[in-house]
Image (tube, grey):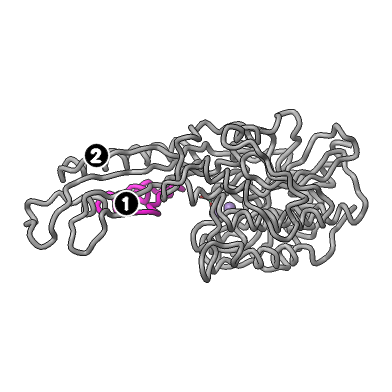
């Protein structure tokens, strides 16, 4: 059985740290790596080089995903996909996403060093867009791979008005000066070929994603890793509230139609209604913008997002409906206009029962106590579940902190995760021998 170098996990963590700064970040003094930006491209070139060193070929697929390929024992073998995402939230941490990609590379490095070929190929994916931090849609690139992407790609533009089509063209055209490019086949397809990133159903055996927990459960139990049982359902809305812009000094309070004051009441109702449900429902307003945005101008328009999640889809939907009803009431009472657009809707995604058992067995073999837990955070695995059975391994993160520069993973925990992943792969290979 291949066990991997005892420091492969630590190397994965160190590589995530390296990717936390320029040129792999588009933000001074912190990490912001959005889909199809120069930082994303620099990251793809660097990580592609690491894939090459680990014994894989590497390419960029038509949706801007980086894909490393390690052939199986037979050329017609199906593939195990190991993946996570390379993009980050604004001012995020270094490990949310990239750690799962780096650990996938370490799995292949260990197998390659041992000269081990499996009854399946391994494809390591560095997905381009999971967070949705650039375009008003999330998980575009894993949805393309799974064949579940049902949005009109031609209408998507970022907040600066750059169309997705242009961003993809520039990303593919970007040149790397260090020669890493030679290992990457850049897809020349453009936006019309985006959906060609799709993988065929019968050719993918399973999907494995390792990810930091982004919550405190493993740390509280003194455990390094745990088996994920499933991922909570997500809904996201974009709300635009319109009133009347005016002079802050001359418009009497009685005459105002202030959309920001209205939005403030709406934001509070999002929090109140999710709390009042007294369940696992969580609801968040994470982005808000008042226009035109000056201290002496009553805003004319306010835009904000609402994100609602629960492990139980019906609970999520009930609370979402209550929130939308309350927004209507508040807008009516304040004589405001509004528009609400649902921009994201992903069902809850259970992990595969048989693969969870394999993961538990790999955990025990690596000397870990088995522990199962649900994910409140979204992951590319949610989309890949439409393509094949999925498995996820969570890794303890300090204080449960994530989407924050203080995100931290102990390299020793990443080493344990690598051993568990290799144990999982060996067990899967035994099943398919
Ligand atoms: C991704 O991090 C998400 O859960 O939104
Ligand atoms: Mn995230
Ligand atoms: Mn993530």
| Residue 233 pos. (x, y %) | 50, 41
User: Residue placed at 66% from the left, 53% from the top?
Assistant: 175
**Up/down of 79 relative to 11, above or below:** above
Q: Is residue 267 magenta?
A: yes
- The x and y percentages for residue 293 are 26, 58
Q: Residue at x 59, y 66 (%)?
A: 22
Q: Quadrant of residue 250?
A: bottom left
Does label 2 or label 1 sit earlier along the sequence? 1
Q: Is residue 356 magenta?
A: no
The magenta span reads 264-288
The reply to whether callout 2 and callout 1 are in contact (CB within 8 Å) is no
Label 1, residues with CA under 10 Å away: few <14, some 14-19, many ≥20: few
- For the C terminus, the quadrant is top right
Circle 1 residue? 272
The one of 277 and 49 positioned closer to us in this rendering: 49
Identify the residue at image location x=51%, y=38%: 346
**Mark 2 lies on residue:** 328
Residue located 43% across and 39% down the image: 343
- Estimate the x, y position of residue 74 in percent, counting from the top left: 90, 35
Q: Is residue 83 left or right of residue 2?
A: left
**Image check: 26 left or right of 317?**
right
Q: Is residue 238 above or below residue 289?
A: above
């Amino acid at each position: 059985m291949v066990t991997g170098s005892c420091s492969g996990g630590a190397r994965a963590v160190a590589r995530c740290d390296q990717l936390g700064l320029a040129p792999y970040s588009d933000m001074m003094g912190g990490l912001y790596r959005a889909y199809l930006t120069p930082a994303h491209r620099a990251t793809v070139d660097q990580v592609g080089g690491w894939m090459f060193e680990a014994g894989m070929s590497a390419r960029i697929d038509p949706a801007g995903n980086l894909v490393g390929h390690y052939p199986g024992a037979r050329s017609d073998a199906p593939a195990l996909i190991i993946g996570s995402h390379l993009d980050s939230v604004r001012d995020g941490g270094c490990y949310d996403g990239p750690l799962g990609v780096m650990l996938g590379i370490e799995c292949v490095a260990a197998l390659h060093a041992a000269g081990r070929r499996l009854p399946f190929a391994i494809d390591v994916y560095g997905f381009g867009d999971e967070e949705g931090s650039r375009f008003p849609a999330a998980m575009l690139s894993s949805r393309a791979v799974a064949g579940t992407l049902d949005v009109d790609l031609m209408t998507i533009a970022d907040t600066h008005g750059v169309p997705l089509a242009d961003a993809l063209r520039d990303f593919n055209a970007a040149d790397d000066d260090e020669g890493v490019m030679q290992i990457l086949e850049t897809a020349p397809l453009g936006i019309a070929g985006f959906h060609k990133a799709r993988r065929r159903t019968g050719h993918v055996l399973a999907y494995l994603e390792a990810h930091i927990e982004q919550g405190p459960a493993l740390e509280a139990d003194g455990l390094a890793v745990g088996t994920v049982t499933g991922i909570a359902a997500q809904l996201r809305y974009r709300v635009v509230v319109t009133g009347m812009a005016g002079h802050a000094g001359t418009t009497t309070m009685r005459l105002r139609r202030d959309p920001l004051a209205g939005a403030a009441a709406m934001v509070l109702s999002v929090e109140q209604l999710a709390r009042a449900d007294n369940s696992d429902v969580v609801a968040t307003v994470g982005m808000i913008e008042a226009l035109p945005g000056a201290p002496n101008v009553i805003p004319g328009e306010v835009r904000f997002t609402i994100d609602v999640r629960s492990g139980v889809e019906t609970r999520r939907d009930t609370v979402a409906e209550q929130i939308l009803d309350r927004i209507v009431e508040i807008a009516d009472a304040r004589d405001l206009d509004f528009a609400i657009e649902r921009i994201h809707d992903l069902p809850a995604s259970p992990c595969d029962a048989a693969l969870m058992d394999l993961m538990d067995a790999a955990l025990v073999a690596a000397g870990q106590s088995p522990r199962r837990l649900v994910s409140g955070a979204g992951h590319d695995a949610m989309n890949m579940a439409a393509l094949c059975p999925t498995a996820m391994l969570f890794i303890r993160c300090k204080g449960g902190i994530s989407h924050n520069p203080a995100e931290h993973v102990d390299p020793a925990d990443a080493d344990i995760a690598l051993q568990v992943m290799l144990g999982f792969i060996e067990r899967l290979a035994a099943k398919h021998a």
